[in-house]
Structures are given as C-alpha cells and as structure tokens.
Image: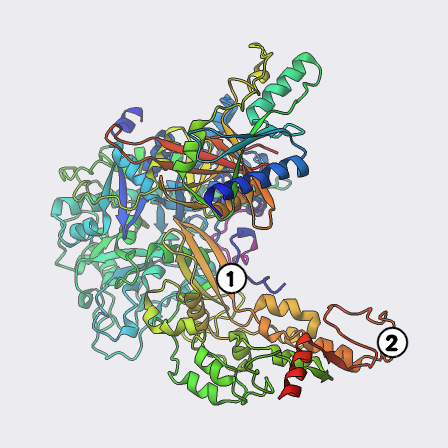
Amino acid sequence: MSADQHLQALTKVVVNNLENQHDWTQVQIHIQDNLPRPLIYGLPPKRLYVHPDEQIDIIKAEKQLNQRVPQEPELEWVLPLHLAEKWSISDFAAVFDAITAIPPGGEFVNANEDAQWQLWRGPKRGKRILLATVQDDSTVTYYWMHNGLVKPRQN
Amino acid sequence: MASTEDDRQVRISKIAGRYLVFDIDDVAYIRRQHGICAVFTGTMPQNPTQNVFLGLPLELYAEDAKMLLDRKVAYIADDPLEHLTQLKSMDDATRKSYLQSIKTQRRTAQLVFNEAKAQSMAKHKDKRKPKQPQPPVVVPTELPLPASSADDVTAAVDQEEEGGAESLLESSSSKPVKTDSSTPPQKPLVKEKLPAITPTTSNAMISNGISNPDVENHTALPLYSYLNERGYFITPGLRFGGDFSVYPGDPFRYHAHYMANSYGWDEKIPMLDLVTSGRLGTAVKKSFLMGGQKPATENSEAGELRAFCIEWAGM
Amino acid sequence: MPLDDDLEDNPSLVPPPSTTTTNNATGDAATMMDEVEEAEDAPTADFRLFASTYSKTKNISAQTIRKGEKDFESHGTRAQASALDASRDAMRDVLSYTRVHNTKSASGWCRGWYFPDWWKDWPEDWEQQKSKRGKEGGGRRMRRKRTGNYHRCIQSLGRAVTGLPKDRPARGREWLLPEEALYLVERGSLDLWWPTRGIEEVFPADGSVPTAAATTSAKGEGEQTEEDEEEDEDDEYKYGLPLSLQAAYALLIGEDGERGKVSLQKFQVFSHLKRAGYNVIRAPTNPLPVQDDTQLTTTTQPASKPKSVTEWLISCLPQSKSSPTDPPPYGPLVPPGFYRSYNTIYNYLSLRPSSTSSSASSTADNQPQKPQSPESDGYDSDSNSPYKIHYHIFKASTKFTRTRPPPPDFYISVISAKDTSIPTLSEISSLLASAPADLPKAEWLAGGPARLYARLKHGYRNVLLAVNDHGVINYMRFAQGGFAKEELFRNYDMRVSGGPRRGGGGGGGGGGKKSGNNNEDDRGGLIEVEFELLASRLLQSAVS
C-alpha cells in the first residue's frame, strides 16, 4: 500500500469514527498544498473545548445578563495519525503554521466587541487541533494539541 | 538590600557535575529576582527526622546555572578545588579572618543560648502558676538562631567588627570577606567555653572567581529559559512523570500547570509517548507541554521555540 | 498487602522517628504532618508551617494555615503577594539557622577530623573509610554521653577499626564513610574539622587527647602558633579548622566511585532514608561470592529446569521429568488420546524455560544467584551497568547493630532519573540476581490459590530502585514474579479428579468452572484430546 493510500485509509477511519461514534456533522476533508497530509474538520454535537479564561468570561457574562449563555459547538480541526507514527516538533509546527485558528466557514458572525466571552470564538481563539490517533484495531483516541502555552482546564 | 541585590553574584558550587547553592541569601535572591526555586536537598538541623521540609544546599538544574551565568548574576565555582587549595595553603590573614568570623558566631550562639535558657526558665516559672496552660517550651537540643533575634544580639556583641553580623547570618557576603586583620581583638564577653558552630557557607574562607568551570549538559535550556522568561517556575518532573514540572508562579503559592518535556527540533517522538504523557498529565490535572527550538540558520541566530500543549479531549 | 512494607515517598508513611529528642515540636508537628501529607508536591511545602512549629514568636499558628490554599494562578491580588512574601520570609528565617554544638552541655559534642588518606594503603575492603571522627571531652564514651536520636544515629553509623598495632595513631577512634560524615554534619551532630597537623599529632598513639588537654591546661602549652587573648579558645585551632557545611560537601561529594567520596545522588538517597528513620549501610562493593560453576552444578540436579537456550535444547531430550516425552518434530504437541489429568497435557505444552521456575526450585538457597537468562551472559562485562545494589536498608524496628547487622530488610539501587534508561532485561536480571531470595511469607506459600496474588505481588527476589531527579527521589520496587510457579492447571485436576460430579451430563455441571478449557465430558475425569490432525495422521499411518 502506498503512502497515499495509507493516508486515505487513515483519514477515512477517522471520518467514520467522528461521524458514527461521536456524532459529528459537517465533517470535511481538507487538503492544502502546504499541509503534509489531509486534515479533517467538522462540528461536534456539543462544545468540545472551553478555555479556562473563557469560562471566567462566560460566568461574568451570565451574572451580568442574569441568564445562561448558550454554548454552541464550534468547528474543530482534526489531524489523523497512526499510533506507530513518529512526529517531531517541526512536523507539528508545520501543520499549525498552515492552518487558521478557525476552520473554513466557522467564523462567528455576530461577534460583539463588548461581550468578552464571544471573542473566544473569534479573534481570541488560539490554534488547536484534535490529534486523532488510530490504532491497528481502528480504535481512535482523541487528544487536544494547542499551539503555545495553554493552561490546563481546571475540572 | 536592594542595592546589594543589584550587584549580587550568586556563588554556584559545582561539585562532581552538580550545581549547588549554599548561601540562603543567594537562594532568596534567585527565587525572587530570577524565578528559580529548584530543590532543597539538605537535612534541616532543627528537625532532622522528617522529609517534608528540607534545607540547604539547593540543587540547581544545569539549565538554572547556565541561565544565571548568561545573565551575569552568578559565577560557577569549582568548590572541591577551591576548598582544597585554600585549606592546604591558607595565608595567615585569611586564617585569622576566618577564625574571627567563627568566633563571632560562637559568641552570638552563646548569647542566644543564654537568652533561650532565660526564657525557658521564665516559662518554667510561669508554669507553676495554676490555671495557665502553657504550650510546651520550645528549647531544641540544638540551638536555633532565628535571624530576627540574632540581629539584635550581634549588634550587641561586636559592632566594631565589620562583616561579623553578616557572616553570622550567613547572609550578605558573596563578596570576599575582608582579609584585613587590623581589627583589634576583643575582650571576650564570657570566660566560659563557647559553643562550637558549623557555618553553612565557606564565605568567610574562600573568595570568588578563582576557577570558572563551565556549565555542561544543559540541553533543555531553550525551553527552560523560554518558560522562565514568561514567569514560570520549574522543578524536577519526576513526581508527575515528565522532565519538568512547570508552575505559573512560585510553587509556594501555586499548583503546577504543566508537565513538560524538551525535544530536539527534528527529534521524532513516538505517538504513543504523546498519548501516554497526555493521559498522565490529564490524570494529575496538568497539561503536557512539549517544546523544542529551531536550530540557528543563516537568517536567524537562535531559531524560534515552539511549544505545544496536550490534554485529553474528553471524547 | 504484600507491598505494605515498601518504602514510600510519602513522608506520612515512613516509620515514625523512634526517639525524637530534637523533635521539640509540640502537638503542632503532628498537625503539620497531617496537613502536608496530602500536598501534591512536597518540595513546595510551605516553610511557614515549619517556622510556626519552631518559633512561637512568629505568631503563625499551624492551624491558621490550611492545606489546599494554593491557587491555580496569580490574580495579582495583594493577598496573594503578601502570602508569598510571608512564605519566602519564613523560608529565609528557617534556613538562616546556624548549626551550634553545645560544648558545655553534659552530653558533650562530637568533633570529626578529615583524614581521607589514612587508609589508602589498606586493602580495598577498608577503602571506604575516609573521614575521621574523634571524640572530644577526654575520650569519654560517646554512648554514655548522648541520648535519644543522637544516640541512635551514632550507634548505627561509623566503624571502629580494631586489631591495630598499639603504636598506630588514632587507635580506637571511629571512622565514618563520607556519606555518614556529611549526614552528621548536615543534621548538626558533627563538628567536622580540617586538620592542619598530621594524624600522629591530633591522635597520638599513646591515646592521649591533645585537643582536650589543650582545653584543660591551655596555659601550660608553650607553643601556640597564634598569640591570642582569648585564653583557651585559640588553642583549639592549633590542630585544625572547623569546616563549613559547604566545605564538607566540597570535600565529601564526588563522582561515582571516586575514592573517599560519595556521589550526590547516593548521598541524597542515603540521607533521605536516614531522616525517615531507616538504618542504612553500604552494600559491599564486591557482591557476595558467587560460584562460577553454579550453573553446571545446578543443571546436573534433576529438579532444576533449563536455563539457557543450549540447555533448553538439551532438555528437550527425554531426561526431564516435567515433560514426559520430548516434543515430536511435527504434529500436535499433545498427542491425541485420552488423558486422566490436565497435568500431563500442560506438561506437554510447557516448552519455554522460565527463570522463576528454576529459582523457585532452589527456594532454600538464600544466596544471590547467578543470572540465568541467556541475555545476561554478559553479566561480568556488565560492570558498567548503573543497576547495582548500593545500600542495605533496615527498618527502624529491626534490631540493629553495626558490627553484626541482621539480614537487610531492603536492597536498594540508586539511579539517576536523567542519565539512566529503563533497565534492560540483562540489567534487571543481574540486579535481581545480586539480591538474596526473599520468599513470600510462609502462610502465603502455604495458602494455596487463595494467596495467589499475595505471592505474585511479593515475588521471590526484589530490589528497590531509588530514582533521583535533582534531589527529588521516588522509590520503586522491582521483583521477580513467580508466575511460572503458579501452575493454575493443577486446580483443574483437583476439580476433575476430586470432583464428586460424575455422570453430570447436560453440561450444567460446571458451575465452579473458571476456565473454558475445562473439557470435561460425561465420562467423569477423562479428557479427550482431539485434533483435526488426528485424521490425517491416522491416514498417514494407514498408508505406510
């Protein structure tokens, strides 16, 4: 099997897993010249990541508005990998350098400069990718990888 | 104090390839000004039967030592060599000044001891009064010299002796102690035999800068100083299973945010390592941080440093 | 349960210090420990707690400082800043302590002299004693003079060299290893001196104690090198100088294996264990004598099992009782037929030798064994391996005398977290082989299947690894598991032969079965082995 075929198969396993096990929608395969392999992006059924500082902004906003701020899911990037692979810092850096923080079509349109919490879905969102690591038995494990220093969530 | 901190030169004792700091003022200084807390490794003489609180010396990472050296606030000393050289051929002046500083400390110890004794006697008296519960008197078999009380005492003992008060606290001087022996000998305050003391540092005996060995094996320096410059404190990572534990401030006050590993720019990292480290980090409520520096190129001297953080995605 | 006696990093689990005269802390000490024990990272323990237990004048009570007060991150508040300042100030206060030796007290004090070269011409066995500790105060015996902790630590350290010629200087003095001397200096129990005169003068062969003499008849001595007005004091300095803690480190810490020194890593582990109340002695540099012909002698014993590939090949010949016949060159390992016991079948299936089965067979042997896996043939050339037993550890409860130490409770190897990789099979086998057998408790051995896990967890030999990362130490236990000893199939037989189920047809009789391998049929105890190959074999034989 050529490397190309391998990547295609790998991508397919992850897409299937996202759609059928994790109920993602709008799952797209994203091919770009400066990317070493196809990425995937899609919409999870519920919000997958909230930055600790965003959490604080949301709580503040909820206090101010005296109502719950709904947490719509966001489009997320996914990088399919096989467990047997080895990647270097420079490999990951190349991927992060090639992408925008928000996958195509995911821009938050009604961003209001006054509402701090909304900025986390726009300009304040850092680059992050879900590492989808596929094992030989086609189990897939998902880990977040953030670009730069991102403090851990406190849950 | 501020003025002395400006030109402070921290003595880093290089002993058998390890980097140690013995002077508590150096320790306080690098902690406050350079965000280095490192690890206390010594037994506390006040309570030598516990492992929760440890004392001097402080063991630095080679990265700490290199960083301080590069910032020109420290010097590396080949301690075994300098000690042997000095001890084997000590000139009279140094010898005198060293013994003088020891005597001063012995006298102070005597005074503090007497004071403690008086206090304990007073408390003992109090104890006889009924209905006055007293906490058990704290009179260690070995004698503490708390800085506060020592200050007063020293002032009383010998103000004329320059550097005496400082060396008593093992504080001040990374600068060489004056070897001038013109100080007039004092009348002993007490005729009885003074308690013996073991100074913490050799400041009164050896001066700085005789040897200047290099710092070796600081491969993680790029990531290390990247984090340090951003205000993070770093301690050994053994407890959490990484190279380093990284704190968002002084570990006295904060929990660690990251367990960090340093990699070469093109070092291939097995995906399984990332998964295990990410899982481990999440289990201890930390993010797994991996970082490496791009090698220098023609265009850029020191390449950029890239760091990534990994957490379990919860799916 | 089998791990309950392991060393733990958690300070709350170490044995309580047996006699604590220095533990002047009141009830607060206990509180302090309670509060700190759950702290996730000990190196950041708040010195305010420590200060509060020692200095009542500081007005900080341990009760007001609760655990879990650490924050997630800085909020830039003044409260945070001042709390941090308080912690740092407390650290500074506590660590500004100067070690004082009370020369006046009846208990006296202990002065050591640094004579690193005194034993250098002696056989290697002696080479370890470098630093000299003499006794002040007219040579009265230390043990009478000290009590409590101090007494303990002196008793368990040092070494008197007996049987020396009478005219040798410093007879009857105790000699300390570098780690012992440094540990004593660090805990404030030893006043270490640099001699400026030879040992003959400091400790004359006639047994007099010149330093003590100097203190009592100072004026009578005419040859003070310094003019001094301080009467007796400066006479002390005639023979040497007191050394600082820093100097002690500089003189006693060295590279691994350096003469008269100890590596910092080992020293840190040594003192960590000493502080926790254990008695620690250096493991002999030359491991216990191992006979070179161990392998030969054991292989000739019928009970022992194969050890190396060659031996295994030989053992495939019909000589070993455990496998009734040698495996056929082709075809099924278990010949088709009817069997009355699983033992026979499993013996047919047992092809691979196992190191535990052999060590288990010689359980009586309490000596270190020669490594047995083929990979460890390079044992002797492996002398560079960092995985060696460095210290013998004795629990505080073990009755301990230095001169005739009991069998150690633990064997420990000190490993650097940064410079050492995970041990290879050959390294770990050699390491385990250098420790004597440490069998599971007798009641576990006799406990049958019920104590299976206790036996497996404890293992048959074990060594502790002290992994040191710049002063942070984790302890791990490596044990030789006895999986090969636990022959689970024996239980199947007990069920088969001893079972009262007879004629229990319908397959419902196997309620107690643990394994699907139980091919019991209604013939009760008879096991039928059938293979598809059977047909072909029969066919073959019919043809021929």
Q: Is residue A97 left or right of residue B102?
A: right
Rendered residue at 52%/78% (across/down): C359
Q: Residues within 10 Å of mark 2 (few under 14, many from 20)?
A: some
Reply above or below: C484 against C211. Answer: below
Label drawn at residue C477: 1
Tag 1, which secondary structure? Answer: strand
Instruction: Tell me the tag on residue B104.
Output: none
- The answer to the question of whether label 1 and label 2 lie on touching residues, with beta carbons closer than 8 A, is no
Which of the 4 image quarters holds residue C501?
A: bottom right
Q: Which mark is residue C504?
A: 2
Residue visible at 82% across and 81% down? Answer: C523
Packing grade of label 1 (10 A; few <14, some 14-19, many >=20) is some
As shown in the figure, which amino acid type bears the numbered disc 1? Arg
Which residue does the image show at 58% across and 10% down from the upper left? A112
Q: Chain ID for label 2?
A: C
Image location (x, y in percent) of residue C394: 48, 67
Q: Quadrant of the C terminus of chain B?
A: top right
User: In this view of the protein, which residue sits in the foreground, C392 or C381?
Assistant: C381
Direction from residue B78 to residue C137 in the image, left or right: right
Q: Picture coordinates of residue B286 (x, y %)?
A: 53, 38
Q: How many marks?
A: 2
Q: What are the residue bounds of the magenta stretch?
A: C13-27
Where does residue C309 sit, x and y in percent of width and height? Answer: 45, 77
